[in-house]
Amino acid sequence: QVQLVESGGGLVQAGGSLRLSCAASGSIASFNAMAWYRQAPGKQRELVARIFSGGATNYADSVKGRFTISRDNAKNTVSLQMNSLKPEDTAVYYCNLRIFSAYYWGQGTQVTVSS
């Protein structure tokens, strides 16, 4: 059983920063991808950033240059440093772990950016 526990959401003014963290526990294969998705009200869930166990990353165009994803393989944690936040970044952010064809999700953490 894989569990993902997120932390770090909150309310911040536009231009501010937040750091999200996610800890994975359970039976986790050494090769996997960890990611952050977000879902704003009335919108579909979208990929924000992904990092593979080897360190390769990809980002949504809307967050490139502002967000940085990182991971600690020894601790099975993934973090998302979010800088220069904009009101359109407001959403529930979900941690995701992909092990081959299986996807696991955290419970979500709210990020609200005020203008």
Image (cartoon, rainbow, N blue to C red):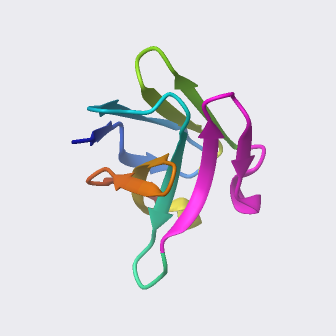
Which image quadrant for residue 52? top right
Q: How many marks?
A: 0
Outermost bottom residue:
42
Position of 1 compared to 43: left or right?
left
Which stretch appears magenta?
45-65
Pinpoint residue 2: horizontal percent, then vertical percent: 27, 41
Pinpoint residue 84: horizontal percent, then vertical percent: 65, 45
Position of 50 compared to 112: left or right?
right
Q: Quadrant of the N terminus?
A: top left
Q: Is residue 5 above or below residue 77?
A: below
Q: What residue is shown at x 49% (from left), y 79% (from top)?
A: 44
Is 11 in front, or is 115?
Answer: 11
Q: What residue is shown at x 41% (from left), y 56% (from top)?
A: 103
Is 68 in front, or is 102?
Answer: 102
Q: Is residue 26 above or below residue 101?
A: above
Pinpoint residue 58: horizontal percent, then vertical percent: 73, 48
Is 66 in front, or is 104?
Answer: 104
Which image quadrant for residue 29? top left
Position of 4 compared to 29: left or right?
left
Which image quadrant for residue 33? top right
Position of 90 compared to 56: left or right?
left
**Residue 60 drawn in magenta:** yes
**Residue 53 drawn in magenta:** yes
> Visible in this render: residue 114?
no
Q: What residue is shown at x 71% (from left), y 51% (from top)?
A: 59
> Visible in this render: residue 53?
yes
Is 56 in front, or is 94?
Answer: 56
Outermost left residue:
1
